[in-house]
Image (cartoon, rainbow, N blue to C red):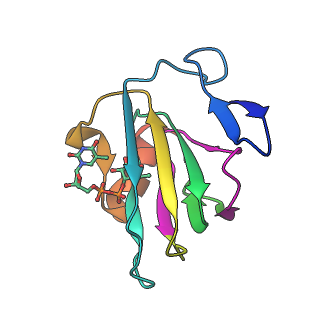
Amino acid sequence: MQLFNDFPDGNLVIGEAKKTVPFEIKRVYYINNLFNKKAVRGHHAHKKLDQIIFCINGSFILNLDDGQTKQKVLLNNPYQGVRLGPLLWHTMEKFSSDCVILVLASDYYEERDYLRNYDDFIKYLKQQKCL
Ligand code: T46
């Protein structure tokens, strides 16, 4: 992403498909109204979908798991996204009440691309010879 830092008149952040964003963007979605302090979203992995996830306001914790290694990432910088590639089990939690999440996705919504059960995720990794 490209940042034009025009402070005090505001910042401009730009992403261009296949330039600063490493794939063709077919879908954009955002998540807000994250007032429930106990909310945990995600609990899934994608088979093929590539995504970049940004916290464009506030903060939250992104938990990543590739079946072998677990990682916790604090997202609190609107200028730095995290690549959320395929076959990464992820959950999102500890949202600040002003949190706004923006996601750039490489494909249209397709429920068949989701692995929403952790055991199925591990089985799928083994089938794909990733484990
Ligand atoms: C992801 C994380 C970061 C649609 O119908 N179209 C869409 O484009 C999306 C994103 C969702 N939905 C439906 C599917 C569910 O019935 O909206 C409902 C809530 O989706 P979900 O529970 O998957 O929401 P999150 O926040 O757990 O996950 C979302 C994305 O779905 C997922 O791809 O990687 O954000």
Residue 66, position as x, y percentages in the image: 57, 53
Q: Is 121 inside the magenta-drawn segment?
A: no
Lateral position of residue 39 relative to residue 3, left or right: left
- 15 vs 116: above or below: above
Res. 29 in view: yes
- Residue 7 sits in quarter: top right
Residue 81, position as x, y percentages in the image: 64, 44
Q: What's the magenta region?
A: 72-92
Q: Residue at x 55, y 74 (%)?
A: 96
Residue 93, position as x, y percentages in the image: 50, 72
Residue reaching furthest bottom?
A: 38
Q: Residue at x 36, y 27 (%)?
A: 107
Q: Pick whichever, 76 or 11, lies toward us.
A: 11
Q: Residue at x 68, y 61 (%)?
A: 76
Q: Is 80 inside the magenta-drawn segment?
A: yes
Res. 130 in view: no
Q: Residue at x 49, y 66 (%)?
A: 92
Residue reaching furthest front?
A: 9
